[in-house]
Image: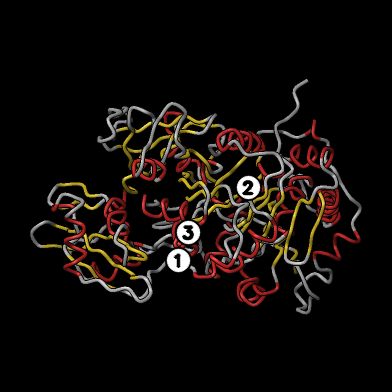
Amino acid sequence: MNIPLTPLRFLRYAEQQYPRRTAVVCNQDRFTYAQFGDRVGRLAGALRQAGVQPGDRVAFLSTNCHRLLEAYYGVLEAGAVLLPLNIRLAPGELSYILNDSGATILFVEKQFLGMVDSFRKDIPSVKMFVQLEGDPEAPWLSSQNYENLLESATPFRADIASIDENSLAELFYTSGTSANPKGVMLTHRNIYLHAQNVCLGFNIENGAVELHTIPLFHANGWGVAHFLTLLGGKHVMMQRFETKEVFRLIEKEGVHSCSLVPIMATALVNCPERTKHNLSSLQRVVIGGAASSPTLIREVEEKLGCECYSGYGLTETSPSLSISRMKAGLVWDGQQRYIGQAMTGYAFPGTELRVVDPNDNDVPHDGQTIGEIVARSDGVMEGYWQQPGASAEVLRGGWFHTGDMATLNNEGYLLIVDRKKDIIVSGGENISSLELEKAILAHPAVLEAGVIPVPDEKWGEVPKALVVLKPNATATETELIEFCRSQLAHYKCPRSFEFVPSLPKTGTGKILKKDLRRKYWQGKDTIRPDFAEPKRGS
């Protein structure tokens, strides 16, 4: 008899093997795996009593908290599909996603009630609004909040054998750049196998303690909800990223690992509070979401006292595809180790990665020839929600086409040089903005850097760097230009630098280069296609 592959089995196992072990720490709340499992069963029962049908989409608008973590299992127990929403989206974007997905219930954290009220009449599919915490006061809210629903519910547990492992389990929406956001469909099988592959790839220990520094609605965050539960680990929740709180929780809860985007890692290594805390429990920091630099990898290892390397993945791949740890048999000495650990890395177990030319033919594995990363793995999505054309295009030939441009060396390590849309084409030469940013970030005065193309009469476009300096640090444009030219070919280097107080970022710290570019291309005869404004739903 074949048992369906579903992440519900992870919680079943943890409840059976580690019932008294701490499962979740969230502010003042602490739950064992027995308590966590009971709450999940009650959430499933409450959803069924509320009329949720198999396949219905259940949306959550929430920061990281134990309730959202419970939804990763309780919604699936009820036979429904979990839809975590990005709390940093605008009202028009959220209403588009809720309408496109046809969500029937929306669970809302109290701080977002005002925003939801502004567009709730525009989302007719949502029949029930539930406040996550506090007493509901608005008349359009359910009279019972989340905790009341759980208290009055009859617990429900699904029959594992009856689950279709290829059915939809989770729906995540891409950010949307030049078009509406697309719903990424992940199946029970996707999630189950991805979690097992991550455990093997990271060699994660039983009972690991993970700090949820990345929002659970983000690709870098939700995978932890699965693999850590499978291993009976402790989920330590953070509502928002604050450096002092990160250090406090690492020390108090004995945190072993966390995931960061580069701007988070930069903030931690430059925070003076760091030396006031005992961080000896910290074993691993994985940097993803955007390219890291060897300088940042070195600073994290030296100042936080743990192993640090890069990881790579996408919403469409559940998300993890590669890690940049040193393989057994390789010897990386000195600076070479930091360079290697800042690479995009090699494929996780259960994953195949290739780098191909425009005709989908493999490029040479020489670490020089640039092509697009394509992936085939257990975690690759079923497709985009109600978009068969877009699904067929991105999954053509049985491989997921990532849109990331990279090289591949003879040891199997990828190095992303840029997104297709971020490659700078100057006088016919392709220039990687990521390569330039890494070079600039090696300067001791630089805190953040974003490199973009700007129009040039002779070359078509040339690189320009926008830089944020570290507090109390100084540098000049001439100094930074010469610094770059000491490391890279002159034609690659920025022709100009601009010093700014901050750079626009996404909710997880990725620099919004489209926003930076717009200022320099407005009114020009030649407009890059990625500058088009996205079309949003009403």
**Foreground: disc 2 or disc 3:** 3
Residue 179 versus residue 223 in the image, above or below:
below
- The residue located at (25%, 36%) in the rendering is 368
The answer to whether residue 155 is left or right of residue 373 is right
Whole-angstrom CA distance, mark 2 to mark 3, is 18 Å
Q: Does dot 2 land on a helix, a strand or a loop?
A: helix
Q: Position of residue 334 (x, y in %)?
A: 36, 42
Whole-angstrom CA distance, mark 2 to mark 1, is 26 Å
Q: Which mark is residue 224?
A: 2
Q: Does dot 1 land on a helix, a strand or a loop?
A: loop
Name the residue beneath numbered marker 3: 265
Give the amino acid type for the residue marked by disc 1 in the picture: Asn
Of 90 and 68, the residue lying toward us = 68
**Foreground: disc 3 or disc 1:** 1
Name the residue beneath numbered marker 1: 270
Q: Which mark is residue 129?
A: none
Of 262 and 128, the residue lying toward us = 262
Q: Could you classify mark 3 by the number of other residues whose Cα lies within 10 Å: few (under 14), some (14-19), or many (20 or more)?
A: many
Residue 249 versus residue 119 in the image, above or below:
above
Location of the N terminus by quadrant is: top right
